Image: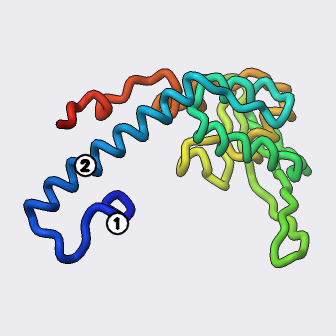
Amino acid sequence: MNAFFDGYVHSKTSLKQFVEQYERALGNKVEKEFQADFKSFSQMIPCATQFEMEERFRSAYTISKFREVQEEFTGKVYCNVISTLEGSSETTYNVRETVMYDGRHKRKTFVVSFVRNNCKVVCNYHLFEFRGILCRHAIAVLDWNDITCIPNRYILRRWKRDIRRAHMRVPIN
């Protein structure tokens, strides 16, 4: 909330001034979103990898969301599938990631389950559940299984570049 009103109100702002500044802040926010949407429609940033999955995210998502996804694709370089456990309907993978921590290399292992028949992937890192993007560990497992086309369930509508946002149609005087 503070960031939204930063530069518009202060502790001595009256109620009347607050309402006026709220309208101004909302108008500026809508204008910035229009500009960001226009930029997403008119520009594309290059992919960092040769994965078809990354290209699909690039063509679907806004620039800012695609940059988040792109970090996961570049971070996949530090991930290796080290073991698998076949189940009746799903396969469980242990994915080891090498990370820098306090100037030293540290290895962390993540557990990723994959159901081939519906291409469902779940990692115990839970990045998709919390931020709506696949983590590098899940991407590593999809790549390990030769999945090149990302399933639609992992392209969330709210970050698509071609979505019409209802709050953007609210008239601001």
Q: Residues within 10 Å of mark 2 (few under 14, many from 20)?
A: some
The picture places residue 9, in percent across and down from the top left corner, at: 25, 66
Question: On the rendered structure, is 29 left or right of 153?
Answer: left
**What residue sits 16% from the left and 61% below the top?**
18
Name which quarter of the figure residue 15 lies in. Answer: bottom left
**What residue sits 28% from the left and 61% below the top?**
8
The picture places residue 119, in percent across and down from the top left corner, at: 69, 27
- 75, 119: nearer the viewer: 75
Three-letter amino acid code of the residue under disc 2? Arg
Q: Quadrant of the N terminus?
A: bottom left
**What residue sits 76% from the left and 39% below the top?**
139
Cα distance between the residues tagged 1 and 2: 15 Å
- Residue 87's place in the image compared with 79, above or below, is above
Residue ID for mark 2: 24
- 86, 3: nearer the viewer: 3
What numbered label is drawn on residue 103?
none
Q: Residue furthest left?
A: 16
- Residue 22's place in the image compared with 117, above or below, is below
The picture places residue 159, in percent across and down from the top left corner, at: 51, 34
Three-letter amino acid code of the residue under disc 1? Asn
The picture places residue 91, in percent across and down from the top left corner, at: 77, 39
Residue ID for mark 1: 2
